[in-house]
Image (cartoon, rainbow, N blue to C red):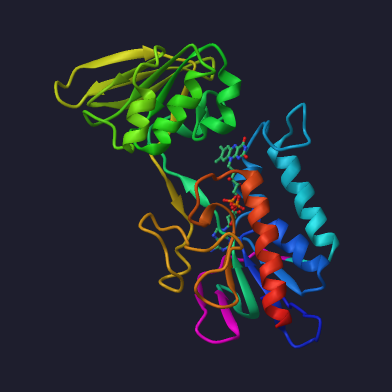
Amino acid sequence: MTNLQDNRGEGLLDLAIIGAGPAGMTAALYASRAGLSVAMFERIMPGGQLAQTEHLENYPGYAQSTSGFELAMSMQAQATAFGAKLVNEEVLSVDFNAPVKVLETAFGIYRARSVIVASGARPTRLGLPLENELQGRGLSYCATCDGNFFRGVDVVVVGGGNTAAADALYLSRICNKVYVVHRRDKLRATAIYHQRLAGIDNIEFIWNTEVKAFIAEDGMMAGVRLANNVTGEEADLACQAVFVAIGTTPNTECLRGALQLDAAGYVLADEMGRTATPGVYAAGDVRAKELRQVVTAVSDGANCAEAAAEFLAE
Ligand SMILES: Cc1cc2nc3c(=O)[nH]c(=O)nc-3n(C[C@H](O)[C@H](O)[C@H](O)COP(=O)(O)OP(=O)(O)OC[C@H]3O[C@@H](n4cnc5c(N)ncnc54)[C@H](O)[C@@H]3O)c2cc1C
């Protein structure tokens, strides 16, 4: 167990942060600069999804794009420079019932006066061969993030919900042709998307169809093998990129009923990250919200740290 000293030497932290992605590291930066004793708990490595992003083009201030990994390392250095501690332990369970909140890891029990849940989310995967190898080489889980790398070429969007519809719209403005492959015979997306998508010339829907395999050439995405789930017919479709938009899964396993979640499992919290439990906040991709990006994660982190500092001052 990591020996954490708070400002009073009592082993009771002002703030514990679950997850050291962009949201958690920004919360740690703001809270430690505000003089709070802070520890970030991270189960893998600091940076979260950002550290896996090869080129980040839409984070303000980097006109030439930046490496997600380098930005993540820089965020970590900045947060720890002001005194926040990084604890490389996974939070396995929490108890938010008393004013002193308790986090349990495999190595011990930690106590804190406030907690920010910044445990992020993970894209739902298709579970096909080559999925790991092709990620960043034509396979993406985020059109807003990676669409620009595929200007003027043919791409496939997999899915039929709101994210898939929004991705198809976004990509239709950038790419030559957008094929939307959906396993049902109509979109699940809300009506407004049906209207917006109708009449866009470069979007083509391929209904009742599933992606069976990725086709790679020289290590890059070159196409997909499709199977019609009504007729059983199979066909190959050439494309330079595939955007998988079949949902994301929030990392809330350690919460086990400790906080209110929405129907999709995201933590319900207001714009300042306040949950219904006093002293407990949610920041970044794990929070129920519309746009999950680095820029919204860092702003959530700052808001939550501010709200936690205000709560502790009371
Ligand atoms: C491939 C890819 C490309 C992307 N490209 C872009 C882009 O170009 N631009 C952009 O703005 N956004 C992009 N995104 C989205 C962006 O990375 C996320 O929105 C952002 O990282 C969310 O930050 P976060 O801190 O909320 O969560 P995360 O980055 O998911 O970090 C959460 C952290 O919490 C840790 N954690 C989870 N549970 C526990 C636990 N129980 N105990 C301890 N630690 C825990 C995780 O290990 C992780 O490190 C991309 C995402 C992916 C997957």
Residue 22: tell me if it is visible.
no
Q: Position of residue 106 (x, y in %)?
A: 55, 72
* Residue 7, quarter of the rendered image: bottom right
Task: Provide the residue span drawn in magenta.
Answer: 86-104
Q: Residue furthest left?
A: 231
Image quadrant where one finds the N terminus: bottom right
Q: Position of residue 128 (x, y in %)?
A: 38, 33
Residue 70: tell me if it is visible.
yes
Asked if residue 262 lies left or right of residue 294, the reply is left
Q: Is residue 94 magenta?
A: yes
* Residue 80, quarter of the rendered image: bottom right
Determine the residue positioned at 42% across, 37% down.
163
Q: Position of residue 67 (x, y in %)?
A: 72, 35
Determine the residue positioned at 46% across, 30% down.
167
**Depth order, front residue of 162/41:** 162
Determine the residue positioned at 73% across, 80% down.
313
